[in-house]
Amino acid sequence: MNHHGKDIKIFAGNSNRELAEEIALKIGLPLGASVVGHFSDGETAISINEPVRGSDVFIIQSTSAPVNDNLVELLIMIDAMKRASAGRITAVMPYFGYARQDRKAKARDPISAKLVANLLTTAGADRILTMDLHVPQLQGFFDIPVDHLQGSPILARYFLEKFKGKVDDVVVVSPDVGSVGRSRRFAEKMEVPLAIIDKRRPKANVCEIMNIIGDVKGKRAILVDDLIDTAGTVVNAANALADMGATEVYACCTHGVLSGPAIDRIRTSVIKEVVILNTIQIPKEKRIDKLTILSVADVFAEAIERIYGDISISTIFTQL
């Protein structure tokens, strides 16, 4: 029994309209009538063109590039819904930007992820629905409920189908120590061994491979991470795996940020295929042959329906 809104309404910003439409279609609802644009001076302009009083409202918006524009769009949409007396407001953020700024790495650093969490709460969000935060501890930055979905089951299922159960020569590889937990869960789903790359990062977006822990010689290696940004880490890791005797190298992640030289690096790398999820909308010019994009619409649609119906979301993971 739903106690938070008389009906359910789904709205979308501009960041990933394609995914929002797919989610709405799977739920069997149209996207809410709204216009998200800009005034002549560049300020964000929001118009909500249908009543939301008492409704359970879900706003789908990834805070991907242009990060600040998309974040402000989301904040203003939340504020508009709150002032229009929505019953409950859930910010559906398939990709949560600023997640990598989660601690003070050096003196006088901001903790921008916490600031963004505060902004979303202050704007009027009652709940956050997201996927694969850079570190799960970010949930603790919020004073409102956070439903944290996982993308690895979708990726693992893809590779199991791709290799048709013939995984005797497959190894899952964590590109760094920080991703070991994620990679271990992935390896367990595929029932294959795990290897770890020990690396040193001298500065942001630059990494130097040190050594590989585990056996990759003569094996098909799958690099697993939460996101690929400039692709420096994944390409360097792939080169190291090839040098150590891996026969094929694949890479996968939940969030395809793919900024700067990422596409060129992937195109010319030893990586055979990069598999990502559509939490971030990938422009056509970046959709190269090596890139495979899988949809998260089914998972988010089911999560939204469960939140609306006050049903546990944790059971979703046992179904994947």
Image (spheres, rainbow, N blue to C red):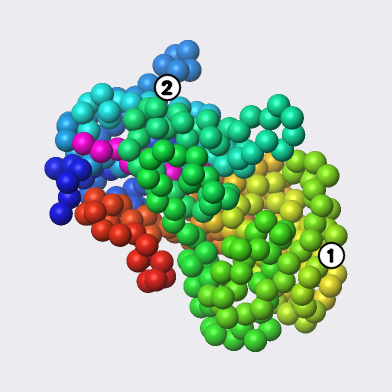
Q: Which residue is mark 1?
A: 211
Which quadrant of the structure image shows residue 74? top left
In the image: residue 285, left or right of residue 232: left
Q: In the rendered structure, which segment of residues is drawn in magenta?
A: 87-96
Q: Which residue is mark 2?
A: 44
> Residue 29, percent across and down?
22, 49
First of labels 1, 2 by sequence position: 2
Locate the C terminus and report the quarter of the image it occupies.
bottom left
- Residue at the location (21% across, 54% down)? 309
Magenta portion: prevailing SS class: strand
Residue 122 lies, with reference to residue 4, above or below; the image says above
Which quadrant of the structure image shows residue 242? bottom right
The number of discs equals 2
Q: The residue tagged with tag 1: helix, strand or loop?
A: strand
- Residue at the location (61% across, 83% down)? 167
Q: Amino acid at mark 1?
A: Asn
Identity of the residue furthest to the top in this view:
41
Which residue occupies the foreground of this view, 129 or 310?
310
